[in-house]
């Protein structure tokens, strides 16, 4: 059995009179990237703040590396590296001094390790400049370097690609995969973008309004949910042909969508062509979060 | 713990606040030195001599004139009376209360800055030391390390205590160094009187003792340091309670200034003596100036400040270790 590095059980948080997190449970396994997917205001950041010890859970249990974080804070935190929202390091210190600062807060982490993580995130050239002068991407990297200093087992990143350009996002994604696959870290990543989670994660928890709606592997969640978008003419004839083999949806913009299946779709295309319908466009489309939500919650829309 | 303190020192130094404070103190001292120098010069011109006995004689005459003037309040009259008696005592015992020289300047500077100036400088550092972590967001990184929160806060408090000691030391060194250029560096052994006590009947000189200036200065420094630590701790508490550095500073500033104003006008509002800010002028007790409210003594004021200090520290640690960080 795979080792569980982070375990969350029936976590709740009440702020004021409002219950913001209404009982969340999940486990992280060694070497996996776990996605935390939900729309704005779902409670992702609030949950993460509880996981890293910034706010106290109203009830529930959190264990990191086997240690309960309320009872054994120091031991638990030794196994954790994190960035909550943006990595807000000290702008008036150099990148190196920032790392030194946080290394000082860890036992047995010295200059060697600082050098190691600096090279790992590729900041060697600018590490002695003040953080003030860094670009957002460089700050993200320094944030990651800081999180990795203590050789954690669990890495928690809240919206790690926030504000990065496409190249930066891809780089970050590859880096996170590398950490999980090569270094065996468990990584928890939150996001409100399905596309991102899909490319990055092994498993995903979908949360909405403070509850987990579903936890599943990305593969299970998305297969059978991909659609094909068609455009053809004459349109009525084409619809008639498709309707005879599958269910179709008409979109307002004149596109027709059907389910996606590698083999069947090719056959339908053949049928259309044989019936004298010219197919001008045929696109495979990933489901978007909204659609997934609609399906999972049975029409209950996003807050 | 050492490493945590090292961290805080690193941040303190990188912010360059201490340097700014040193510069401000330097400029102020230079200004006061010049003012003092002008004053001495003016006196000399007016009286045609620089014999201090003549000068004190003149001051006593001035004070007598003012006391007999009808326009001033009884309270003010009483204060003048006390000052006059004190001057008379100095004269009678042939002791110069303002022996020229850097040590005397330093003493006067400390006595005048204990209430507002030094606390302000201390506040600049203390009110930012925790709240800046909040406003920058770095608190999220600081509190997610395998270090208990009270240790993080303690390292900050120790650093603050160190910075405060440094500020007091800087004030001493600069006021000695700069004023010495003008007045000379001698005068450590000059005799100073202490132990005047103010009673209903006026000035009581029964307990008056003669001590060396350096001894007096040592006590002054102790008192200044104590006041600075208390004010620093209260600013520290505000820094924990209020996320915004500016708001924290504003509250403390209002308290300090109201203290300076209140001391001059609360003599009939007796319970005001439990405010920390009317108790800051500890050096007054040393040279026998009447307290802002009747019945206040050195030990009373120190006790009040000590209680405020303990509350400040307790609240800081309680809130910091318990509160949710958003
Ligand atoms: N300090 C607070 N006081 C009151 N309500 C809060 C507080 N912090 C968060 N909330 C509420 O909790 C809910 C969840 O917020 P949270 O920041 O966890 O969302 P999120 O999933 O991280 O969203 P986003 O994708 O926008 O970052 C929101 O409805 C928010 O209004
Ligand atoms: Mg968030």
Image (cartoon, coloured by chain):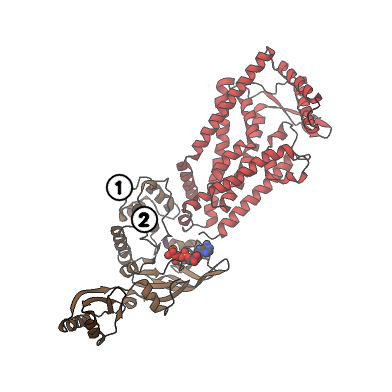
Residue interval drawn in magenta? A81-90
Q: Chain of mark 2?
A: A
Q: Quadrant of ligand 2?
A: bottom left
- How far apart, in angstroms, are the residues tagged by discs 2 and 1? 16 Å
The residue at which mark 1 appears reads as A125
Which hue belongs to chain A?
brown
Residue B243: image location, x then y, percent: 54, 52
Residue A33 covered by magenta stretch: no
Report the disc number at residue A140. 2
Q: Determine whether, in the image, residue B324 is placed left or right of residue B92.
A: left
Q: Chain of mark 1?
A: A
In the image, residue B320 above or below residue B87: below
Residue B277: image location, x then y, percent: 67, 42
Residue A85 covered by magenta stretch: yes
Query: Which SS class for mark 2?
Result: helix
Q: To which quarter of the image does residue A203 belong?
A: bottom left
Decide which of B254, B315 is in the foreground and name it: B254
Q: Residue at the spot x=49%, y=62% of the render?
A: A53
Which hue belongs to chain B?
red
Residue positioned most to the bottom: A244
């Amino acid at each position: 059995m795979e080792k569980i590095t982070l375990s969350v059980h029936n976590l709740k948080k009440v702020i004021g009179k409002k219950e913001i997190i209404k009982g969340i449970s999940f486990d992280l396994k060694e070497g996996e990237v776990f996605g935390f997917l939900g729309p704005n205001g779902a409670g992702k950041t609030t949950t993460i703040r509880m996981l890293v010890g910034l706010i106290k859970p109203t009830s529930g249990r959190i264990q990191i590396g086997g240690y309960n974080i309320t009872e054994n804070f120091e031991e638990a935190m030794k196994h954790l590296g994190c960035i909550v929202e943006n990595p807000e390091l000290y702008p008036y210190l150099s990148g190196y001094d920032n790392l030194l600062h946080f290394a000082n807060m860890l036992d047995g982490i010295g200059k060697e390790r600082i050098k190691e993580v600096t090279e790992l995130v590729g900041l060697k050239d600018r590490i002695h400049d003040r953080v003030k002068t860094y670009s957002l991407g460089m700050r993200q990297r320094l944030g990651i370097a800081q999180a990795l200093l203590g050789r954690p087992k669990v890495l928690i990143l809240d919206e790690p690609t926030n504000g990065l350009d496409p190249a930066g996002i891809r780089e970050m994604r590859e880096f996170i995969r590398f950490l999980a696959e090569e270094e065996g870290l468990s990584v928890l990543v939150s996001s409100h973008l399905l596309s991102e989670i899909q490319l990055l994660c092994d498993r995903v928890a979908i949360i909405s309004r403070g509850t987990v709606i579903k936890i599943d592997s990305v593969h299970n969640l998305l297969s059978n949910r991909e659609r094909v978008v068609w455009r053809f003419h004459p349109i009525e004839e084409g619809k008639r042909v498709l309707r005879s083999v599958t269910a179709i949806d008409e979109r307002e913009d004149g596109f027709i969508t059907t389910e996606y299946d590698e083999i069947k779709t090719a056959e339908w295309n053949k049928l259309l062509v044989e019936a004298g319908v010219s197919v001008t466009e045929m696109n495979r489309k990933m489901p978007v979060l909204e659609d997934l939500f609609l399906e999972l919650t049975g029409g209950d829309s996003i807050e | 713990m050492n490493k945590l303190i090292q961290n805080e020192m690193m941040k303190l130094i990188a912010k360059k606040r201490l340097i700014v404070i040193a510069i401000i103190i330097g400029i102020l001292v230079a200004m006061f030195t010049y003012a003092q120098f002008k004053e001495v010069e003016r006196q000399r011109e007016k009286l045609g001599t620089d014999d201090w006995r003549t000068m004190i004689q003149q001051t006593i005459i001035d004070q007598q004139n003012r006391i007999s003037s009808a326009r001033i309040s009884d309270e003010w009259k009483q204060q003048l009376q006390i000052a006059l008696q004190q001057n008379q005592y100095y004269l009678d015992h042939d002791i110069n209360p303002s022996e020229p020289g850097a040590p005397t300047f330093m003493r006067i500077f400390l006595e005048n800055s204990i209430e507002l100036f030094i606390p302000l400088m201390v506040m600049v550092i203390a009110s930012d030391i925790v709240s800046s972590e909040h406003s920058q967001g770095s608190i999220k990184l600081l509190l997610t390390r395998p270090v208990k929160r009270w240790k993080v806060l303690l390292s900050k408090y120790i650093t603050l205590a160190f910075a405060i000691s440094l500020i007091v030391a800087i004030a001493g060194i600069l006021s000695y160094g700069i004023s010495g250029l003008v007045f000379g560096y001698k005068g450590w052994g000059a005799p100073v009187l202490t132990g005047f006590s103010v009673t209903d009947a006026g000035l009581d000189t029964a307990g008056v003792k003669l001590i060396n200036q350096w001894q007096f200065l040592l006590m002054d420094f102790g008192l200044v340091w104590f006041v600075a630590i208390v004010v620093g701790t209260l600013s520290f508490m505000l820094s924990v309670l209020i996320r915004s550095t500016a708001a924290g500073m504003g509250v403390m500033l209002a308290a300090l200034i109201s203290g300076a104003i209140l001391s001059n006008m609360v003599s009939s509002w007796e319970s005001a003596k439990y405010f920390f800010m009317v108790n800051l002028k500890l050096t007054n007790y040393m040279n026998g100036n009447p307290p802002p409210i009747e019945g206040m003594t050195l030990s009373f004021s120190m006790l009040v400040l000590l209680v405020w200090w303990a509350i400040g520290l307790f609240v800081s640690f309680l809130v910091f270790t318990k509160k949710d960080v958003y």
